[in-house]
Image (cartoon, rainbow, N blue to C red):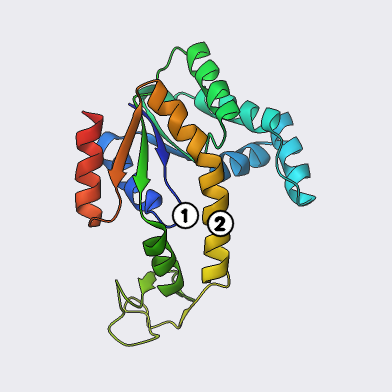
């Protein structure tokens, strides 16, 4: 099963990807993981990506697409994968279609976890993370037993600098600008599946599974 997982920052893609990996026994491939692996392996494309990242520049499309091609050609992707963070543009989506054709693979669905902007901002602004173990809480939706203290290890909870309303609004504006053409692209080829991301984690997972049947 080959799935494209879409959704705005804070929609819960990571949580659902973990569950899908366990449910179907397939690889979870994120753009960041691909870049890190290519750099670690020292491939030519990995070296180019590393040079861009070290210079604080965006990795160009041709390098990104090449790294995606290398990753999807590995044996663990034959059974299936969840692709997270790629494609981000229609051009990248067209390149992905070409890669899958070359590898004799086909995309099962483009799953978009849809959450209203106001709720995403509320989730981000209320997020608190443990300095010691990294456990995540929310002052509204998932409070720790004792305010400011991690339930797991007793560490201090803090708010990340980028979990501000202004930063989140900016990230969402960029996301919507990039993603709306992609949604139309996958609607046109019949692969688009819209999931209600406002529900509980279990309910969202059940809806994704139903959409993939």
Q: Residue at 73% of width from left, 43% of height from top? A: 50
Left or right of 148 in this view: 19: left
Q: Residue at x 27, y 83 (%)?
A: 145
Residue 79 drawn at (x, y percent): 35, 24
Task: Please tell me whether mark 1 sits on a helix, a strand or a loop.
Answer: loop
Q: CA distance from mark 1 to mark 2?
A: 8 Å
Is 72 or 92 nearer to us in this picture? 92
Q: Circle 1 sits on which residue?
A: 9
Q: Residue 46 is drawn in which quadrant?
A: top right
Label 1 vs 2, first from the N-terminus = 1
Report how many numbered discs are placed on residues in the image: 2
Can you say which quadrant of the picture contains the C terminus? top left
Q: Can residue 127 be seen in this snapshot?
A: no
Q: Is residue 156 left or right of residue 90?
A: left
Image location (x, y in percent) of residue 128 = 43, 74
Pick the front one: 154 or 56: 56
Residue 200 in picture, x, y percent from top left: 22, 57
Q: Residue at x 62, y 41 (%)?
A: 35
Element type at marker 2?
A: helix
Reading the image, the residue beneath label 2 is 171
- Using the rendered view, name the quadrant where residue 81 is placed: top left
Query: Would you call the spot at circle 1 few (<14 residues within 10 Å), some (14-19), or many (20 or more)?
Result: some
Q: Is residue 152 left or right of residue 117?
A: left
Mark seen at residue 46: none
Task: Work out whether 67 lies above or below 103.
Answer: below
Judged by depth in the image, the label closer to the viewer, 1 or 2, is: 2
Residues 144 and 95: in front is 95
Nearest the viewer among 125 and 83 is: 125
């Amino acid at each position: 099963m080959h799935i494209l997982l879409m959704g705005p920052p804070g929609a819960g893609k990571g949580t659902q990807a973990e569950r899908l990996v366990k449910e179907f026994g397939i690889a979870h491939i994120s753009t960041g993981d691909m870049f890190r692996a290519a750099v670690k392996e020292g491939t030519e494309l990995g070296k180019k990506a590393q040079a861009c990242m070290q210079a604080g520049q965006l990795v160009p499309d041709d390098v990104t697409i090449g790294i995606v091609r290398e990753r999807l050609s590995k044996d663990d992707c034959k059974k299936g994968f969840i692709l997270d963070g790629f494609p981000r543009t229609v051009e990248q989506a067209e390149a992905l279609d070409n890669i899958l054709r070359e590898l004799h693979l086909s995309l099962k669905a483009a799953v978009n976890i849809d959450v209203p902007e106001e709720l995403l901002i509320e989730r981000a602004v209320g997020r608190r993370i443990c300095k010691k173990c990294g456990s995540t809480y929310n002052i509204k939706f998932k409070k720790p037993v004792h305010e400011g203290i991690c339930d797991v290890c007793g560490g201090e909870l803090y708010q990340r600098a980028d979990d501000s309303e202004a930063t989140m609004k900016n990230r969402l504006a960029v996301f919507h600008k990039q993603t709306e053409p992609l949604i139309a692209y996958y609607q046109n080829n019949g692969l688009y599946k819209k999931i209600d991301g406002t529900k509980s984690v279990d309910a969202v997972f059940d809806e994704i599974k139903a959409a993939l049947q």
